[in-house]
Image (cartoon, helix red, strand yellow):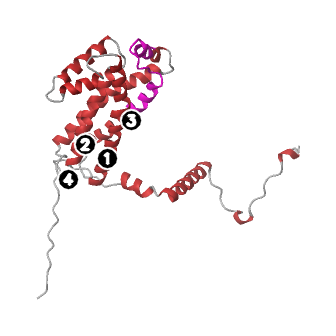
Amino acid sequence: MPLPKLLGRAKPADPDHVGEPQLAPIEAAAEAGLTVVDWIDERTALSPGVRWLMFRKVPKGINWAYTLGSATLFAFLNQAVTGVFLAMYYRPDVAGGAYESIRNINDNVFLGQFVHGMHKWGASVMIILIFMHMGRVFFFGAYKYPRELTWIIGVVLLILTMAMGFTGYLLPFDQRSYWATIVGVNINNTGPFIGPYLGDFLRAGPEFGATTLSRFYAIHMLLIPGIMAALIGFHLYLVTKLGISAPPWVKAHEPEAVTEYVEV
């Protein structure tokens, strides 16, 4: 039965490409993807930077302990992504709004309890991983020349990670987080010189009040993540530029002396 004329006729084959093998769908999709990548790279010249970042030599003898830095980065990304979704439903209100918003996330929001659990336990996992990463760098002697600045940035990131956990602990605003935060702020308040000023800054005033929760929320959501993202970028740049240090049990091989024989 002939097809209706509305469907039209089949497009005639291109005489210049008659007899050539047709690409499989997967190959055609891959070729199309390469075409898009070439189009973007021609206008941005990103490929040299990506090759410099991704493809580099690594020393012999490395093991799974060298993946702790990447694992910590993955934990930070997990905290950032889950934190964005939690912020869509969270309300920093001391008059029951903060606590009720957390209950709403866990009880009513689709996958809310799962995302909240990933963020809550991911914070502990990130602290454990960054301590293990810093311990590996210290015991392997990877902080020595020329990687001193990389080590200093790592120490600052460790402090910021602890501060991130401290400021995020108050956000559910239940009895445990409320009194634990008061104890933590009072401990900071007893520090020498800057202790009282730090305590007033964290409390957003002389006393623990309604603005304290907003202060902690702003620090937890905006200030610390922004600083950490910038430092992580610089940290990765230094790691890529300076390379990875070899394990302490791997000795560098000295070049063998070349002996020349001269006929007499």
The answer to which quarter of the image holds residue 228 is top left
The CA distance from mark 2 to mark 4 is 14 Å
In the orientation shown, which residue stands out farthest toward the front?
206
Residue position marked by numbered label 2 in the rendering: 153
Which numbered disc flags the more N-terminal residue, 3 or 1?
Answer: 3
Residue 25 visible at all? yes
Q: In this view, does 78 lie above or below 251?
A: above
Q: Residue 146 carries which label?
A: 4
Residue position marked by numbered label 3 in the rendering: 77
The CA distance from mark 1 to mark 2 is 8 Å
The CA distance from mark 4 to mark 3 is 28 Å
Closest to the camera, between mark 2 and mark 4, is: 2
Q: Which of 164 and 119 is in front in this view?
A: 164
The CA distance from mark 3 to mark 2 is 18 Å
Task: Mark 2 and mark 4 in contact? Answer it, CB < 8 Å.
Answer: no
Residue position marked by numbered label 1 in the rendering: 234
In the orientation shown, which residue stands out farthest toward the left?
264
Dot 4, crowdedness within 10 Å: few (<14), some or many (≥20)? few
What is the x, y in percent for residue 184?
Answer: 23, 20
Residues shaded magenta: 78-103
Task: Mark 1 and mark 2 in contact? Answer it, CB < 8 Å.
Answer: yes
What residue appears at the point 28 percent right and 24 percent down from the top-left corner?
202
